[in-house]
């Protein structure tokens, strides 16, 4: 399969993330719906965490098995282990650093003279920056999902490069469904977002398309790279980076849903998100992956 066709497949799989974007523009969702939406996003992310960690651990597990059976050495264990620990640490602590930097920037903005409300809603600072904790959380979710989708793109590219057309097609369909649920997970915190005065903050389509590009674009990039060469260490690095960032985002979202004190709605949302993740992943597995 040609590189141009492979890139087209990666683009289709990645672009499916826009299907969930309209959820982020819900102006006044019922409080119960907001809880379910946020909890469902946590469910999707919990599935993704399990998915990326199992895939990232597989080379280490294989290396350990080889040593146990006397067919391997400790070199691959140390190498993959270092990638695993490094990627997980950078992914988690990197988002912590990003979040703190954003918080300090927001504090500086609040100290600056405020300009009149903009036509699109919200308040602009003197430097023209609109701050929103929900947007910040949405951006962090997009980063974590984007790292995960890069690894998915590698799988599409490798299947296409091997002329496994049927497998590549199933991967695109499965990952497109995956990305549709991931798009919903990215924008769920934005539904019904309010400013300090209780006014609805509707994210612009420009912002929504930006987070979609961050989350889905790496699928396209990964497909192009995967078509050229296969690298298990590269996959492990990006999978663990994704896992670390997803852990941090899950912790943030759990703090949001816990404030609602509706355990029943949280459980329903978690179940919906988990089932969505496993059902769409089942389509990929049915293709023989």
Image (cartoon, grey):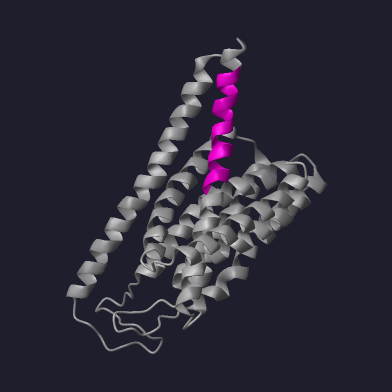
What's the residue at 54%, 27% (across, down)? 60
> In this picture, which residue range is highlighted in magenta?
49-65
- The image shows residue 287, relative to residue 173, as above or below, that is above
Return the x and y of residue 176 as percentages of the image width and height: 67, 59
Residue 279 lies in what quarter of the image? Answer: bottom right
User: Which residue is depicted at the point 59% across and 33% down?
Assistant: 232
* Residue 53 is covered by the magenta coloring: yes
Quarter of the image where the C terminus is located: top right
Residue sticking out furthest to the front: 264
Q: Residue at left 45%, top 77%?
A: 31
Choose top left, top right, bottom left or bottom right for residue 271: bottom right
Q: Residue at x 52, y 47 (%)?
A: 49
Who is closer to the viewer here, 160 or 266? 266
The secondary structure that dominates the magenta segment is helix
Left/right placement of residue 40 relative to residue 172 reads left
Residue 278 coordinates in the image, percent (x, y): 64, 52
Front residue of 151 and 96: 96
Task: Please say whether residue 210 is visible from this viewpoint.
Answer: no
């Amino acid at each position: 399969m040609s590189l141009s066709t492979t890139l087209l497949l990666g683009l289709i799989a990645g672009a499916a993330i826009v299907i969930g974007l309209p959820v982020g523009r819900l102006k006044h969702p019922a409080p119960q719906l907001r809880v379910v939406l946020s909890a469902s996003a946590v469910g999707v992310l919990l599935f993704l965490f399990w998915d990326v960690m199992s895939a990232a651990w597989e080379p280490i597990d294989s290396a350990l098995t080889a040593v146990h059976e006397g067919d391997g050495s400790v070199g691959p264990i140390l190498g993959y282990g270092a990638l695993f620990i490094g990627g997980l640490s950078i992914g988690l602590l990197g988002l912590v650093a990003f979040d703190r930097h954003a918080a300090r920037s927001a504090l500086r903005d609040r100290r600056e003279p405020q300009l009149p409300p903009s036509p699109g809603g919200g308040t602009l600072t003197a430097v023209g920056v609109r701050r929103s904790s929900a947007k910040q959380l949405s951006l962090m979710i997009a980063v974590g999902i984007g790292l995960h989708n890069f690894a998915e793109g590698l799988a599409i590219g490798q299947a296409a490069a091997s002329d496994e057309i049927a497998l590549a097609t199933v991967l695109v369909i499965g990952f497109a469904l995956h990305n549709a649920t991931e798009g919903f997970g990215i924008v769920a915190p934005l539904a019904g977002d309010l400013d300090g005065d209780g006014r609805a903050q509707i994210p612009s389509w420009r912002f929504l398309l930006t987070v979609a590009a961050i989350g889905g674009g790496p699928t396209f990039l990964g497909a192009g790279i995967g078509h050229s060469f296969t690298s298990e260490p590269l996959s492990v690095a990006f999978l663990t980076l994704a896992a670390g960032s997803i852990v941090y985002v899950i912790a943030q979202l759990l703090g949001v849903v816990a404030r609602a004190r509706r355990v029943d709605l949280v459980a329903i949302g978690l179940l919906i998100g988990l089932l969505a993740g496993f059902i769409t992943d089942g389509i990929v597995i049915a293709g023989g992956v």
